[in-house]
Image (cartoon, rainbow, N blue to C red):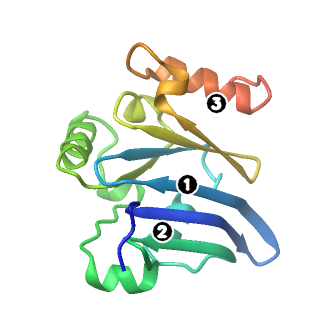
């Protein structure tokens, strides 16, 4: 079974016990695209990534990779998952260059960070996780004539948080 989308999430929710982490996450990602997951520490970014790669099962919703349920696809399709600062250094834009290279070679990339300068100008879309909800924003919607900068991402994030400055 094939799909025009490499990764497709539909109404995904996650909980730890009775505590809701997030709900109603939906997005599609094609080969050659990158989506950045943005949120404060504890917002659910890592939980979403773990659900996408099958390390945890969503409380609700469906995740498909290349048209297959994620648990089936991950046995057949090469997938990379890096987590926590222990595996990636907190400095040097080498990660941005690597992710851009992977995207340009037709990989689908989902990257998460609370450091917006890491995500600026490398993603085609951004998934903001704020107060258990997500908002999907395409890069061209925030910056139609130039690259998405960390300042643009910060402004969008602050707006979604109700005007409260982040940081």
Sequence-wise first label, 2 or 3: 2
Question: Dot 3: within a 10 Å radius of its alpha carbon, few (fewer than 14), some, or many (20 or more) residues?
Answer: many
Placement of 10 over or under 93, stated as above or below? below
Location of mark 1 (residue): 27
The residue that disc 3 covers is: 157
Of the numbered discs 1 and 2, the one sitting upstream in the chain is 1
Looking at the rendered image, the quarter that the N terminus falls into is bottom left
| Marks 1 and 3, how far apart at CA | 18 Å
Q: Residue furthest top?
A: 145
Q: Which of the numbered marks, if any, corresponds to residue 52?
A: 2
Quarter of the image where the C terminus is located = top right
Q: Which mark is residue 118?
A: none
As measured in the structure, the alpha-carbon distance from the residue carrying label 2 to the one carrying label 3 is: 23 Å
User: Is any part of residue 93 visible from this angle?
Assistant: yes
Point out residue 124 in the picture as x, y percentages from the top left corner.
41, 37
Query: Which numbered disc, 1 or 3, marks the residue closer to the eye?
Result: 1
Local SS, label 3: helix
Q: Quadrant of residue 122?
A: top left
């Amino acid at each position: 079974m094939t799909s025009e989308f490499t990764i497709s999430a539909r109404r995904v929710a996650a909980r730890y016990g009775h505590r809701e982490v997030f709900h109603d996450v939906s997005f599609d990602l094609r080969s050659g695209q990158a989506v950045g997951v943005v949120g404060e520490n504890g917002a659910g970014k890592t939980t979403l990534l773990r659900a996408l790669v099958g390390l945890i099962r969503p409380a609700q919703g469906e995740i498909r990779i290349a048209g297959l349920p994620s648990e089936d696809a991950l046995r057949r399709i090469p997938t990379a998952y890096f987590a926590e600062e222990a595996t990636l250094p907190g400095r040097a834009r080498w990660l941005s260059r690597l992710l851009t290279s992977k995207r340009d070679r037709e990989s689908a990339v989902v990257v998460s960070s609370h450091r917006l300068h890491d995500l600026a100008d490398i993603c085609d879309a951004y998934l903001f996780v704020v107060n258990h909800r997500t908002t999907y924003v395409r890069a061209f919607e925030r910056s139609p004539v130039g690259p998405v900068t960390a300042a643009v991402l910060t402004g969008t994030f602050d707006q979604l948080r109700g005007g409260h400055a982040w940081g």
